[in-house]
Image (cartoon, grey):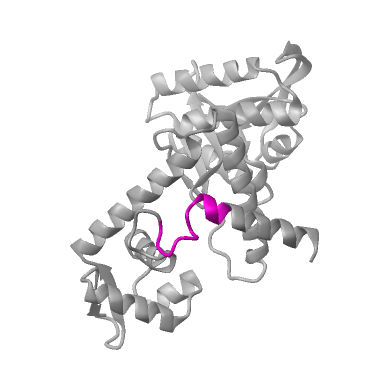
Amino acid sequence: MSEPVAEIRTFNRFYTHIIGLLDEHLTDSPFSLPEARILYELASNDTVKTAADLSRILDMDTAQISRILARFKARQLVSSTVSTDHAKLRILSLTPEGQAAFAALDRSAIDRANAVLAPLDSARVSRLTQSMREIRSILDNHRSETVSPAPAYILRTPRAGDLGLVVHRQAYLYNKEYNLDWTFEGLIAGIMSGFIANFDPAREQAWIADRNGEIAGSVFLMRTDDPQVGKLRMLYVEPSARGLGIGSALVAACIERARAVGYHKLTLWTNDFLLSARRIYQEAGFKLMEEERHHSFGHDLVGQTWTLDLRPE
């Protein structure tokens, strides 16, 4: 047995014990793992309509799904109706009892996850969640080579908690990748604080790149003292999501919005060592206007100002 196989088996035994999957039923629940997965998809996935949908999404045998659905119907957790589009299709939905059962199951799962995290400090929680993202990314990339890929990401507006995490991840990654010190976190925290406190929805916007429910990157359009000039700020992409075109998509969204609100120019400030970001800016049409040496974040750096003319030719 190879070492990687042994490590996977060891990890599986460890993790299933931690989250209680060795029990006949999930912790504090009358449901088995397959039953819980079906309840989750019926409650949370709008694309699930039929037993065939469940089989495809969960990669479960149709006979097993049929047996579980029969038990659910007997317990009045699931109902089915004839599709208006096709008489042979049965559309599944949770009954009020089924929705209540899912809500209890969901609360139990959250409590279990909180119990796992409770003994850990914030640094260990960050390491744990990032490692989980990396595992998912590696395995998802492999699956995408053999399975018809779902959309790799979406761009959305921020939700509660997103912006604090963006500050944390940028500060962490810029320290890890470029050795910038803690004063860089002070800079971006101040920028973010000002953006939140003085947000002008008519002139500003923020975009979160969401990949499988996790933040994969972000960018911000912010106003300046000149009403004709907007500013692109705080572009970043998570390491596990690089190479998917997320950086270019975020910049394109920012440019499109800047044009829509009537800015004549869009500017940005960066440092010359951020090569990937500079390539994105150049491809989007930004021109390097100014360079300035400065000592910041523990290093001698070269700052750059880039500008994009948004006026029609």
Residue drawn at (51%, 45%) of the image? 214
Q: As drawn, is 142 to the left or to the right of 262? A: right
Q: Position of residue 199 (x, y in %)?
A: 40, 24
Quadrant that contains the C terminus: top right
Looking at the picture, does residue 309 appear above or below residue 186? Answer: below
Residue drawn at (51%, 32%) of the image? 165
Residue drawn at (40%, 77%) of the image? 65
Of residue 10 and residue 282, the one placed in the foreground of this image is: 10
Residue at the far top in the pictured view = 295
Q: Position of residue 231 (x, y in %)?
A: 55, 26
Q: Quadrant of residue 272?
A: top right
Q: Quadrant of residue 72?
A: bottom left
Of residue 83 and residue 97, the one placed in the foreground of this image is: 97
Q: As drawn, is 254 to the left or to the right of 177? A: left
Quadrant that contains the N terminus: bottom right
Q: Position of residue 270 (x, y in %)?
A: 68, 25
- Give the residues drawn in magenta, as a range: 15-26
